[in-house]
Amino acid sequence: MQPIDDTAIIKALKFGNVSAFDEMYYKYNKKLFAFSLKYLKDRAEAEDLIQKVFIIIWERRELLDENKAFERYLFKITRNEVYDVLKKRVTCEYYENYILDIQDPGMDDLERKKLIEAAYQLIDHLPERRAQIFRMSKEEGLTYKQIAEILHITENTVDTQIRHSLNFLRKEMLKLRTIILFIIH
């Protein structure tokens, strides 16, 4: 059973009481921050995530149920947001490694940074719809099915557009990598 004070705070929060929101924030933000930091290992990223969690709470305040364990609900939202951040990290890392073929142990951080910047600039040279699909997949971490539903296209179209994007980027990155390595060395 949750403490009575959470019940009263949630009731006030449901009616848009900013003081109740502040009280809830100060009661839980440190716990949620510690939980997030444990997985994200980045203070700024964890702070941003906690801000997002409390924005979600504010936006969904009218749907809160004062009879349910609020702390459990907060941690569930936080856990889902942490998963999203970690999923995007993995997606971006995979994308950068795939496009840039960064397995070269002789490549230094400056070369890597230049190539990553160039890759992101090349995306702007894709046809608008293709770039949108590519960003939704690689930067936002959406599945092909989610992208297809949002854009009202088939999953096959999403797959084709992403393959075309990757082929274009890989081909252009090989050219750029040769130029950058020539300039740096």
Image: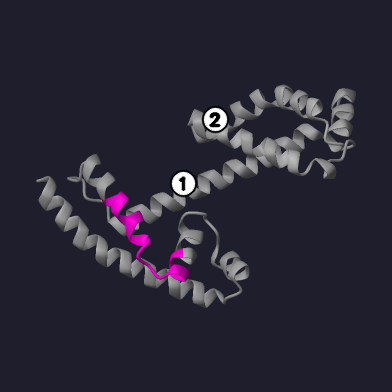
Question: Label 1 is placed on what type of residue?
Answer: Arg
Please give the name of the residue rendered at 28% of the width and 44% of the height, measured from the top-left corner: 113
Which residue carries the number 2 mark?
37
C-alpha distance separating marks 2 and 1: 15 Å
Which residue carries the number 1 mark?
89
Q: Is residue 97 magenta?
A: no
Chief SS of the magenta region: helix
Residue situated in front as seen by the camera: 185 or 122 = 122
Q: Is residue 102 above or below residue 9?
A: below
Q: What x and y, as percent, mark residue 182?
A: 10, 52
The answer to whether residue 1 is seen in the rendering is: no
**Marks 2 and 1, the one that precedes in the sequence:** 2
Please give the name of the residue rendered at 73% of the width and 22% of the height, measured from the top-left corner: 27
Q: What x and y, as percent, mark residue 87?
A: 52, 49
Within 10 Å of disc 1 (Cα), the crowding (few <14, some 14-19, many 20+) is some
Q: What x and y, as percent, mark residue 84?
A: 57, 47
Question: Label 2 is placed on what type of residue?
Answer: Leu
Please give the name of the residue rendered at 89% of the width and 33% of the height, measured from the top-left corner: 11
Q: Describe the element under mark 1 as helix, strand or loop.
A: helix
Q: Is residue 73 above or below residue 130?
A: above
The magenta segment:
115-131
Q: Quadrant of residue 101?
A: bottom left
